[in-house]
Amino acid sequence: MNDIFETYQLKHGATMRSRIALAPMTTYSSNPDLTLSDEEETYYNARAKEFGMVITAATAVSKNAQAFDNQISIRDERYLESMRRLATAINKEGSRSVLQIHHGGRMNKPGLYPNQDIVSASAVKAERPYAQTPRKLRTSEIYDIIDDFANATRLAILAGFDGVELHGANTYLIQQFFSPHSNRRDDEFGGSVERRLKFPLTLVDRVLAVKKQYGKDDFIVGYRLSPEELEEPGITLADTMILVDHLATRDLDYIHLSQGNFRNRSLRDKTDTEPIITKVKRVVGDRTAIIGAGGIDSLDDIEEALALGYDLVALGTIALSDAKIVTHLREGVTPSRVFDETSLLPSPLFERLKSWRGLSDKGYSFK
Ligand SMILES: Cc1cc2nc3c(=O)[nH]c(=O)nc-3n(C[C@H](O)[C@H](O)[C@H](O)COP(=O)(O)O)c2cc1C
């Protein structure tokens, strides 16, 4: 496919110099005050030279939103300067800068931050060894969190970002409201699948209203989601088709599918052999772009992803080891799977990756 490296225009006019985005990746490397560190700035600036769009690490919209050690924050005006540095590090290289806005909900690690209130849709613990039973949010507090996302969007516009991505994937708070596992509410935010949609869709509408008030017409708004959950009860593909249909009626620039592999079929129903992207594309049609992620490591993978129906692709792990990944793909050079000083990674991320099982099985090594 020849148009991988050609200019791509999103629905509201923003242009990308290729169809390749950097996947959002947490770096665990902020300064102790949760502002962007110099090492993070270097990491982003290097990737911005390569990618059509850089989607940042999950960035916490409030104190209770923080899910990871040294996770950058956009909770209030005090973080504006830090966010300006991040936007500038990306914008100055001609890549589109998209800030991923996030709340961890019940996935926040207990004890990570002093006096943090671990909250979710309902008081149901995640099926994870370290999880703590969260406190169920009062209805009025849900509106406060929606305000936090709206405020983060306003700050992202002031900081100079080209867009925001709502982190509705990977089991965090937005997904927790959509999931029948974590959402057992019986008020306007829970119960039927329609009521479980209320939190994500209200968020999207608020973010779009903030864009209209403060942003340019081409300000990018995207939504990331995980199509299925393995828990019982859990999000099914039937639920997700309803979600993406509603998302497609909104003025979003893209829907981003977060999967272990971009070719995935249903994980819940092994008899269903149709790729998830085929189902999503059938519902969404050309109403908005779809980004694929998960195991996209080569030009062949990108071509396969575009042929399957994705409009754009996001590269994760391979873009951590190889800081020049897009140049290498374009020039036919085999991407580097060696993590070393040329990877230009913040040191806490480098150290953390060393301890991750599974990377060596995928051919990665450390120097
Ligand atoms: C170190 C690391 C941090 C990540 N942090 C985030 C994150 O902040 N937000 C998010 O949506 N996904 C996050 N992910 C998931 C990636 O965006 C991506 O979906 C996943 O790594 C699969 O793509 P890959 O096979 O190309 O690595 C992270 C992945 C890695 C490896």
Image (cartoon, rainbow, N blue to C red):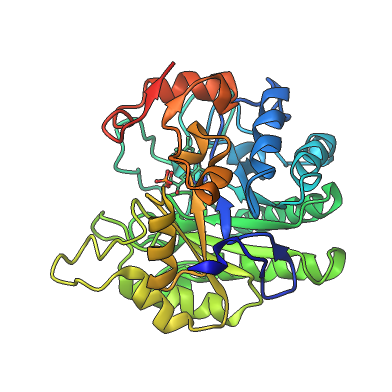
Q: Nearer the viewer, residue 89 or 69?
A: 89
Give the number of marks. Answer: 0
- Spot occupied by residue 30 in the image (x, y as percentages of width and height): 66, 26
129 relative to 180, above or below: above
In this picture, residue 270 sits left or right of residue 287: left
Q: Nearer the viewer, residue 30 or 9?
A: 9
In this picture, residue 297 sits left or right of residue 46: left
Instruction: Report which quarter residue 85 is drawn in.
Output: top right
Q: Nearer the viewer, residue 311 or 49?
A: 49
- Spot occupied by residue 42 in the image (x, y as percentages of width and height): 70, 29
Instruction: Report which quarter residue 192 is drawn in.
Output: bottom left
Q: Residue at x 73, y 74 (%)?
A: 12
Q: Residue at x 82, y 41 (%)?
A: 84
Q: Quadrant of the C terminus?
A: top left
Considering every residue shown, the one lying at the far left of the view is 271
Q: Residue at x 31, y 37 (%)?
A: 128
Whether residue 192 is visible here, answered yes or no, is no
Whether residue 1 is visible here, answered yes or no, is yes
Q: Residue at x 33, y 57 (%)?
A: 181
Q: Nearer the viewer, residue 173 or 262?
A: 262
- Spot occupied by residue 197 in the image (x, y as percentages of width and height): 49, 71
272 relative to 119, above or below: below
- Spot occupied by residue 306 in the image (x, y as percentages of width and height): 45, 68
